[in-house]
Amino acid sequence: MNFESIHIEELVLIKKLQIIRTPFLDYLLKGVTLFDEQPLLLFMGIGFIYGVDRTLGLRFLALLLLSGIVNALLKSFFEEPRPCWLDPSLQVFSCPKNNGFPSGAAQSAVIVPGLIIMYRNCLSSWILGVLFAVLLSFSRIYLGVHFFTDLIGGWLIGFGLLFAASQFSKIESFLKKLSKETQLLIAFLMAFLPLLFVSNQNTLNWTFLASGLAFGLVFNKRHIETSWKLGMLSIFISMALGFFLIEFFKQKSILTQSVHFMFGFFILMGLPNLLLLFKSLQAKLKEDYIEISDKR
């Protein structure tokens, strides 16, 4: 598909919009785009699992991974340019090298608030959700990295994925009835199915991370009670491990996919055991403190 004639008109609109540019807006909207960064969304999902609600967190990660894989496949299929490719003067900061359509940020602008609203349907969720969606979507146009058509495509895909998320409970009920071996086979096939169509670096990373999470979910049956302290601790541990793996394996590109698999497996298999150890140590220290206080 080629949107060349439409893009010509869109370039004119983006130039007119950028008349409002100021250094403050540049950095403000650049900051907004950080909320679409894959690592940040991943850590947010981990925080949900251990700090808010396990089901919400797992569905958030599943939807995040599904969105990333679908986006990578469609970008490779359509191969549409970005505004800053066609007119470098529109570039505010950096210009991404991957294709533009559909916008992954627009997908996130629908998925992230949509899933939270599905979990807690209240006025504050709607206000914050709409604000997040508008700012994130607008920032991609303002920064010259997406066309309006990229956003429309991303929104439509985002709503489609949200509908899929509404069916997760039925899928979960079906999978629980299957044997562990069958669950592992399905997890393996579903994670690597996209590689039949596209095998670029981004798709490989998403699929190996998804397979690691799936294997961790199947093997780990130890559930722990959520709390904001465990949520924050889980994010801290995951970030520390993530930065360590990036630093340690940055010169070993051949192991990149293995690292993504190991990290995904750790999130749902290793991390719960570390958090349980933390809880037991915390309880032991509290018990010792009470014992010492009583002796006084």
Image: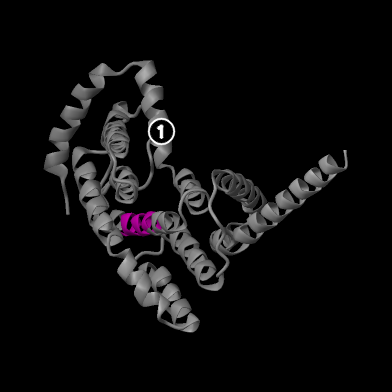
Q: Residue placed at 25% from the left, 22% from the top? A: 18
Instruction: For mark 1, give the secondary structure.
Output: loop
As drawn, is 39 to the left or to the right of 29? right
Residue 29 among magenta residues: no
Write the residue at 33% across / 66% down. Answer: 169
State which quadrant residue 141 falls in: top left
Q: Is residue 196 visible?
A: no
The chief SS type of the magenta part is: helix
Left or right of 103 in this view: 202 = right
Observer-nearest residue: 92 or 162? 162
Label 1: how many Cα within 10 Å (few below 14, some 14–19, many 20+)? few
Q: Nearer the viewer, residue 283 or 188?
A: 283
Classify residue 207 by image quadrant: bottom left
Asked if residue 68 lies in the magenta stretch, the reply is yes
The residue tagged 1 is 94
Where, by quadrant of the figure, is residue 269 drawn?
bottom right
Q: Quadrant of the C terminus?
A: top right
Q: Is residue 253 visible?
A: yes
- Which quarter of the image is occupied by the N terminus? bottom left
Which span of residues is magenta-colored? 63-73
In the image, what residue occupies the spot 76% across and 52% down?
Answer: 284
Tell me which amino acid carries mark 1: Ser
Q: Position of residue 14 (x, y in %)?
A: 21, 28
Disc count in the image? 1
Residue 267: % across, % down = 56, 58
User: In this rendering, is residue 277 above or below 196?
Assistant: above
Q: Is residue 120 left or right of residue 61?
A: left
Most foreground residue, 105 or 93: 105
Q: Position of residue 265 (x, y in %)?
A: 56, 64
